[in-house]
Image (cartoon, rainbow, N blue to C red):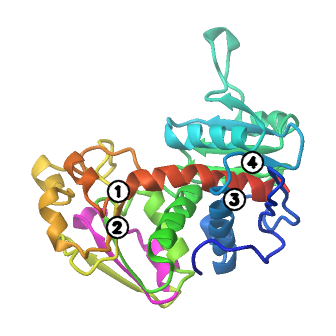
């Protein structure tokens, strides 16, 4: 897969010089719940579509007045705002809900199942973030409208991974033949879990997780990745010299295993002193928000691509909505 090109796949965007409308002829997936539901061609299709969408200043889905319901039961900045703005750019409308009980007088909070049953009657697609990693298994029997997983506990974050892959592809002109370091918190990072699932779809991938042993990748995610025949290494030291991609996940304050000392955390920080160890064409990514895992002085280094990654989020979220709203 290379740089953006004129699409030949009928499920890709059609952009004519005299039109600002985006028309999707087919829809491959009703939901985007797990990155494991996408094969290599699906991922490439999302990347190509996002790049097509980035070339126009105005885009609309050829469907009048579509409505996106954003239900976030965990705090979010980029994902919630990103899907809101992506909807507006495509000509749609947004409703936002953060809890099912807004005032003590409301009594007992409504079940999420009943909330979904009601809201899906009013909207065309649902963006859901929830702290329960098993929430989609609960909701699957009642879903009648497309749903997008915007993070389910510490399990997966498929939309973030599509953004990550868009950035990697556009920097290297490929998604094969990559050496990727996942640094800091592979055990509880849902973004890292989805990224490894996605990388397993590609060839000659080598991943090195770099973290304290307590934060090594869980076996269930290792199993999915290793089934592809790609290579996984685990290391407690910052061995990064050969890496193409540094994917930095950081140490949130509420990790279930234990609190790590500042001394331990600092071993996994990205600082200006580490930059000379990197290959010149290596890139540093971070799903954000940044805590202290990347020193702000790194921001001006040519390898720092995390804010470009964040910008790419708009185009990928537009692509995701476009594919689900055929």
> Is the residue marked by circle 4 packed among few (<14), some (14-19), or many (20+) residues within 10 Å?
many
Residue topped by disc 4: 59
Whether 113 is drawn above or below 198: the answer is above
| Residue behind mark 1 | 249
Q: Position of residue 253 (x, y in %)?
A: 29, 42
Q: Nearer the viewer, residue 2 or 188?
A: 2
User: N-terminal of the two: label 4 or label 2?
Assistant: 4
Left or right: where does residue 30 sit relative to residue 79? Answer: right
Q: Quadrant of residue 278?
A: bottom left
Q: What residue is disc 2 on?
A: 283
Kindly report which numbered mark, 4 or 3, lies closer to the viewer in this rendering.
Answer: 4
Residue under the image location 50 percent in, 35 percent down: 75
Could you tell whether 301 is left or right of 71 in the image? left
Find residue 267 and report its horizontal and vertical position in percent: 14, 59
Q: Earlier in the sequence, mark 3 or mark 2?
A: 3
- The mark lying in front, picked from 4 and 1, is 4
Residue drawn at x 66%, y 77% as measured from the top left = 39
């Amino acid at each position: 897969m290379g740089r953006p090109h004129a699409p030949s796949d009928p499920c890709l965007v059609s952009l004519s010089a005299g039109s600002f409308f985006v028309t999707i002829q087919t829809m491959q997936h009703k939901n985007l719940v797990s990155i494991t539901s996408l094969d290599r061609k699906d991922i490439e299709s999302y990347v190509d579509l996002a790049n097509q969408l980035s070339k126009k200043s105005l885009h609309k889905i050829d469907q009048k007045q579509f409505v996106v319901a954003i239900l976030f039961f965990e705090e979010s900045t980029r994902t919630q705002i990103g899907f809101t703005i992506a909807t507006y750019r495509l000509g749609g409308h947004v409703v936002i809900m953060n809890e099912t009980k807004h005032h003590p007088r409301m009594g007992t909070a409504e079940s999420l199942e009943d909330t979904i049953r009601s809201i899906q009657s009013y909207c065309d697609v649902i963006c859901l973030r929830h702290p329960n990693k098993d929430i989609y298994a609960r909701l699957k029997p009642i879903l009648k409208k497309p749903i997008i997983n915007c993070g389910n506990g510490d399990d997966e974050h498929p939309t973030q991974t599509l953004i990550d892959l868009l950035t990697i592809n556009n920097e290297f002109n490929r998604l094969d033949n990559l050496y990727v370091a996942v640094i800091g918190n592979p055990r509880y990072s849902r973004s890292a879990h989805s990224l490894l699932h996605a990388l397993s779809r590609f060839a000659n991938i080598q991943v090195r997780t770099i973290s304290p042993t307590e934060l090594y990748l869980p076996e269930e995610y290792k199993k999915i990745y290793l089934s592809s025949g790609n290579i996984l290494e685990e290391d407690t030291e910052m061995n990064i010299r050969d890496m193409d991609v540094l994917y930095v996940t950081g140490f949130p304050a509420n990790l279930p295993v234990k609190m790590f000392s500042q001394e331990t955390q600092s071993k996994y920080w990205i600082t200006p002193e580490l930059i000379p160890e990197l290959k010149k064409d290596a890139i540093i990514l971070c799903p954000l928000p940044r805590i202290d895992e990347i020193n702000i002085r790194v921001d001006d280094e040519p390898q720092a691509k995390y804010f470009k990654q964040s910008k790419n989020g708009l185009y990928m979220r537009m692509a995701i909505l476009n594919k689900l709203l055929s």
